[in-house]
Amino acid sequence: MCGRYVRRADKQRISEWMQTHNSDVFDDSDLAPSYNVAPQSLQPVVRLSPETGERELTVMRWGLVPFWSKDGKASFSTINAKSETVATSAAFREAWKQRRCLVPADVFYEWQKVDEKNKQPFAITVKDDAMFAFAGLWESWKDRGTGQKLRTFTILTTDPNELMQPIHNRMPVILHRRDYERWLTPTDPAHLPLDLLKPYPAGEMEAWKVGRAVGNTKNNDPSLIEPLEIDEQCSSLPLFE
């Protein structure tokens, strides 16, 4: 799964990297760098504008709420969507067909189970130290009483590559930059980009152990991604606090 990640970029850098056409649609305070992005937080995503069809940078909440939800909640965790079932899952299948997005990131975290009581956190990224994008889906939910809209997103996951396999049995879908346009562009059901839902090449990634502080979402600073100089015994920690 993907339950935490790092986003160091500001609005301008994301707009330049993702080639968006509007970088002034929300206040910069929504884009403060985060070294411990957690579910239910507001995060920037890139989608095609429903009005213009051009790439736009906007803010959504992490954890997809299906459009048909009665109360604006999901009955199970929707921070991730499995690639293997995204086309058939009631929560994700309509977004998969029509509402794909890019989720900007620099690093993501995963916890390796050491034994029944201990987990070791890792930081994982692409080797060129550039921003990358998770394959995401977005959804818009409308409160029937107030008419207020809530926009949310999820991150797709797939089987682990050779780098990730010793750490965890899932990994987020990371897209190559050359595939951004194809991922975002609407298409007919016979040509949906299923082939992009695959592990990123292990040879283009790197991973390193980090300290236990990342286990607490209250901690949020650059030290979280610093490599451990000496292996330390990690206590069993919940994925989210």
Image: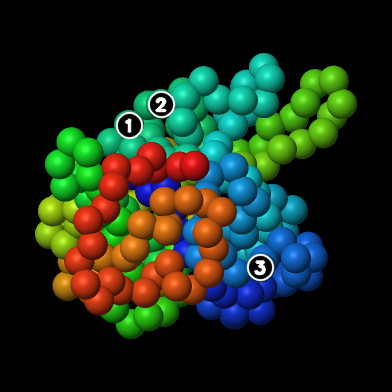
Q: Mark 2 points at which residue?
A: 89
Q: Quadrant of residue 144?
A: top right
Q: The residue under label 2 is which amino acid type?
A: Ser
Checking the image for residue 85, the label placed there is: 1
Residue drawn 16% across and 47% down?
114
Please report the residue visible at 84 percent of the width from the left and 29 percent of the height from the top: 147
Q: How many marks?
A: 3
Q: Name the residue under label 3.
A: 32
Q: Position of residue 69 (x, y in %)?
A: 62, 21
Give the residue type at disc 1: Thr
**Looking at the image, which residue sits at the far right?**
146
* SS of the residue under disc 1: loop
- State if disc 2 and disc 1 touch (CB < 8 Å): yes
Q: Left or right: 144 with respect to 40?
A: right
Q: The N terminus appears in which quarter of the rendering? A: top left
In primary-sequence order, the first of circles 2 and 3 is: 3
Q: How far is disc 1 from disc 2 in space, using C-alphas?
A: 6 Å
| Labels 1 and 3: the sequence-earlier one | 3
Classify residue 220 as left or right of residue 230: right
Q: Is mark 2 on a helix, strand or loop?
A: loop
Identified at 33% across, 69% down, the residue is: 125
Neighbour tally class for label 3: few under 14, some 14-19, many 20 plus, Cα within 10 Å: few
Left or right of 4, for residue 162: left
Query: Measured from the top left, where is residue 156 in percent x and y?
Result: 39, 46
